[in-house]
Amino acid sequence: MEIAGPGFLNLDLRDDALNARAAVLAGRPFPAVANGKTVMIDFGGPNIAKPMAAHHLRTTIIGDCLQRLYRANGWRVISDVHLGDWGLQMGQLIAEIEIEGIAPVYFDVNFAGPYPDEAPVSLDDLETLYPRASAACKADPARLEAARRATVDLQAGRPGYRALWRHFVKVTEAGLTREFASLGVKFDLWNGESSVDALIPPMLEDLKARGLAELSEGALVVPVARDDDKKPLPPLILVKSEGGVLYGTTDLATVIERVRDYDPDLILYVVDHRQHGHFEQVFRAAAKAKLCGKAQLEHVGYGTMNGLDGKPFKTRAGGAMKLFDLIAMAKTEAEKRLAEQGIGAEFSAEERSEIARKVGIAAVKFADLSNHRTTDYIFDLERFSKFEGKTGPYLQYAAVRIQSMLRKAREQGFEVGLPAVHSPEERKLILQLLALSDWLAAAEEKRAPNMLCEYAFELAQNFSRFYGEHHVLSEADPDLRAARLGLCALVLAVLTGVLDLLGIEVPERM
Ligand code: ARG
């Protein structure tokens, strides 16, 4: 250590100190020591009968990365898909089904049940019924009124409507589980807006009794404005004048449910930044009513995914995109790229297809996560799928090349030792590896997946510099070779681990 002018200390890190730490890291690069804290992450948030829009893709990718990151950092994580299953769109569907005469039994007030087990509508039916219903409601106030009434009746517990609605939920859940699984995303809870139905009446009573909720133009609201607000914040509406509850009502009750069931330290809402005002209202109301327990509530917002035209991304036909279609598109692009690069030409068609799937998903996820989440970005599959530059496929390829080198080392019976500093390139690499836990902590603290992308990309670049300068398999000195192989193995473990946090899988070979 030396003093380098006023205000500066220079620390020189000795090789043996670095080596000792690198050896510990090599034993367990991701120790995930439990920190005793619980975080709930609310992401995904698809809506029944409405196809997933581009913003649902972003919440899914970012939210999944955060759940992986928090787990790696030792948190107990509970993720909740929080289905949109309770709003006006449910009433719109029910009213549409009644009008079209699709399943009269659910509307017959004299029917005593039990209702059929089999769903009267498929997921495809819902997806065609909903746009019809929504268009009709826009064009005709009477239809909108019917949908509103159906929503209120559903929420009030009308048996036929509940039974029909349960079918909507079931068919949608089955479809969504498959779509999410194809992206490698899992949720701990499949709760929805409706899950808190029973908590709402006592919550409303309590808020009224404590003078926190008041009537305003026939609606029940919680005022949440503060004197120092730059923009006026409207009150949180809990019950509309005609009786239905709203998005904010279910979100408020969900705070109660989560605190009751999991007593979290933190609840993250990974939702499009355009909903910021909504969350501000809900959080303020929750704080005012002291509903949060020890939990801190935080909206983790993100920007818009735009198309090449700079406007919010849509499919070629102009509609919202389905996850399946998007994954298929990404896979096709990956196939094209792999063929161009001559990668995997000698593999079976099946293996090539599996590689293309992983590469396609990596392209999409990495591109999404590598921008700071609050910035908008342009969805440009061609650019995302390149094997050079800061892309998912580049990093996968970097990892695969280290894998294949280590495979060769094993075949030749070479020893893999502990990493050690022998050159400036190795020092740089080891320093970066040792900073892993700091990066994981900082990415968590800022809820910033892009930092993980940054780290992975730099690691791959530092590795490629090292590999360009030094012999590994062709190194004649067995001790040096073993140390270098050990370094390669550690780089691979860390790179693969960080890619895993990004939700990206590394193919066996490519
Ligand atoms: N379903 C909502 C949407 O499509 C997202 C739900 C987000 N989570 C929440 N707790 N409000 O915009």
Image (cartoon, grey):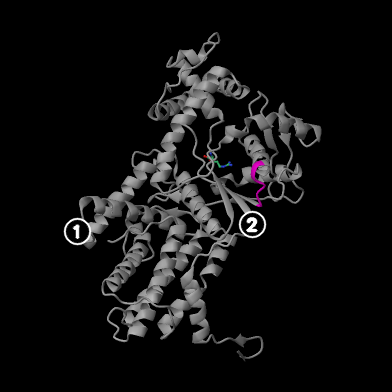
Q: Would residue 14 appear left or right of 363 to someone viewing this image? A: right
Q: Quadrant of residue 82?
A: top right
- Which sits in the foreground, 461 or 243? 461
Q: Quadrant of the C terminus?
A: bottom left
- Which sits in the foreground, 326 or 190? 190
Q: Quadrant of ligand 1?
A: top right
Which residue type does callout 2 highlight? Gly
Report if residue 26 lies within the magenta region. Answer: no
On whether ligand 1 comes within 8 Å of the CB at mark 2, the answer is no
Point 31% across, 50% down: residue: 331
* Label 2 secondary element: loop
Residue range in magenta is: 261-265
Residue 270 visible somewhere in the drawing: no
**Closer to us: mark 2 or mark 1?**
2
Q: Is residue 302 above or below residue 260?
A: below
Q: Is residue 257 above or below residue 118?
A: below
Q: Which residue is mark 2?
A: 36
